Image (spheres, grey):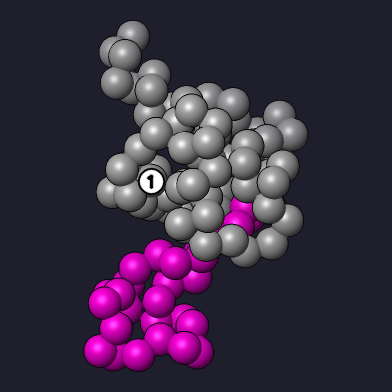
Amino acid sequence: MNMKIQRFRSERGMCVRLLATDYTNYTTVRSLWSMLDKRGYSMSPEAVRFHLDYLIEQGLVAAKRARDLESFQEDSTLSPDDIVMVKLAAKGLQLFNGAISDLEVTL
């Protein structure tokens, strides 16, 4: 199997694992990124967003975008579509607990 694919699956799995074990509610993407780094999963912010996009599309992670926050201002450095907060969705918890599987996420 391609090493890059294995790495992506492992990185997605760590995102799910951290959201399941360390964060019970919404957390900032920056906080998740920092925790990934502390656990030895050093990634660029773009790589974290890449994995979060996949997890969100699969319904494993719920997200709040900049436009969803009351404090968002149009002149902000953020785009309205930027993901700023995430939490594990019910389907993500099912994946974490082994009730379902996703071939693109290795826990």
Which quadrant holds residue 100? top right
The residue positioned farthest toward the top in the image shown: 1
Residue at the disc numbered 1: 48
> Is 29 inside the magenta-drawn segment?
no
> Is 70 inside the magenta-drawn segment?
yes
Image coordinates of residue 55 in percent, x first then y, are 47, 47
> The residue under label 1 is which amino acid type?
Val
Image coordinates of residue 96 in percent, x first then y, are 68, 35
Q: Residue at position x 44%, y 67% from top?
A: 84
In front: 92, or 15? 15
Q: Residue at position x 52%, y 50% from top?
A: 32
In front: 89, or 4? 4
Relative to 18, is 15 on the left or the right?
left
Relative to 2, is 42 on the left or the right?
right
Q: Which residues are magenta?
A: 62-91
Tell me if residue 64 comes above or below residue 87 in the rendering: below
Disc 1 element: helix
Tell me if residue 59 comes above or below residue 75 in the rendering: above
Image coordinates of residue 78 in percent, x first then y, are 30, 75
Which quadrant holds residue 8? top left
The residue positioned farthest toward the front in the image shown: 38
